[in-house]
Image (tube, helix red, strand yellow):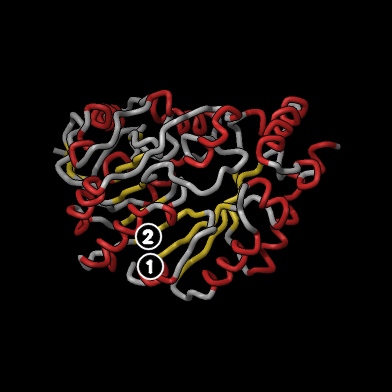
Amino acid sequence: MIHSKHSSSSFCVLPFIQQFVDTDNHILPCCIGNRDSLGPEYKDFTSFNSHYLKDIRRQLLFSEKPKACSVCWKNEDKGQDSKRIRVNKQFEGWEYTTNGAGYMYTSPQYYDLRPGNVCNLKCVMCNPRVSSKWIEDNHLAIEPYERTVKFSDKQIDEILLNAKIIKRLQLAGGEPFYMPSVKRLLQGLVDNKCSKNIDLQITTNLTIIDDNILQLLEHFRKIVITISMDGIEEVAEYIRFPLNWKTFNSNLDKLLQQKNIYTAVNVTKCQLNAEHIDTLLGWCKDKGLDDVDINDLTEPSILAVGSPRSELITWLTALDNHRGTDSKSALPWIYK
């Protein structure tokens, strides 16, 4: 029996304390898990002790390197920081009980959920597996996907049964505030009075936020709202189509008035906005948004900074013709 102690050189705490579920309802060891080593679909409590996760834990306990964790191994081989190193420090002291076979005797204390791919936007750099809205343009998708995925009431109810030991809940999508299952989950945690013990983080496109949601958020111990945005005004409306900039700005002002909510920004840097980043950062500063994280997009490679633009322009032209948008007007630097 192993109680939160380890001497493995490859150990990562996340698969021992966290249940991660991706937008297609499949499990991975964490949000950056290698999808070439995708786990089974999430069902219920039994998923935490699936053969897939037990084998990953076993390898991590004995200094082996699971293929599903390849992103961290690659970073560390380059001498760079990795998510594994960061989370081991962040969650040091969290207690759990397992055995040498990776079987967990304790339930998840941390849920990182993408409760489906239901979304109201079809961002240019996104795909139908992550946004159901993109299915409308599936014939133009770089990674086609035809299924709309939603968390079931049963899945939500079984998480609520585990609510008393949940310390941390992270929600992304799709668009969480567009999903009835998310409201059901948050309301359930408030009703059973467990929300006061939970740190909550939600990643949102901020196109939808109402007073009922804000009232629910007040009941959690700590609340972080991370806003996904990649530009302002016309650039934002083009990249995060069909976002309405006026509505987004109004929702942001409402959010910033909430004293109990910490607000951060996540930016995906790609060919579409690389020359617009300074403008975006200046706008964020004027709004008092100081916590801005910029991530370089690598996939799809057609959108990565430095990739040839001829193929990108051909693809954007096809999108424009289908959506009625104008990339030349919104993103003139692409056509220089």
Residue 32 at x, y percent in the picture: 45, 37
Residue 160 at x, y percent in the picture: 22, 55
Identify the image quadrant of residue 197: bottom left
Q: Secondary structure at mark 1?
A: helix
Q: Secondary structure at mark 2?
A: strand
Q: Where 248 falls versus 118 (above or below)?
A: below
Identify the image quadrant of residue 327: top right
Q: Residues within 10 Å of mark 1 (few under 14, many from 20)?
A: many
Q: Which residue is mark 2?
A: 200
Q: Quadrant of the C terminus?
A: top right
Lateral position of residue 73 relative to residue 139, left or right: left
Residue 125 at x, y percent in the picture: 60, 38
Residue 237 at x, y percent in the picture: 67, 51
Where residue 217 is drawn, which disc sits there?
1
Q: Please state which of the two labelled residues, at mark 1 or mark 2, is closer to the viewer.
A: 1
Q: Earlier in the sequence, mark 1 or mark 2?
A: 2
- Residue lying at 18% horizontally and 29% vertically, measured from the top left: 101
Give, as a three-letter code, the residue at label 2.
Leu
- Residue lying at 38% horizontally and 42% vertically, measured from the top left: 116
Where residue 266 is drawn, which disc sits there?
none
Lateral position of residue 85 relative to residue 334, left or right: left
Asked if labels 2 and 1 touch by Cβ distance under 8 angstroms, the answer is yes
CA separation, marks 1 and 2? 8 Å
Give, as a three-letter code, the residue at label 1.
Leu
- Residue lying at 56% horizontally and 52% vertically, measured from the top left: 228
Q: Where 182 falls versus 300 (above or below)?
A: below
Identify the image quadrant of residue 207: bottom right
Camera-nearest residue between 231 and 64? 231
Camera-nearest residue between 243 and 335? 243
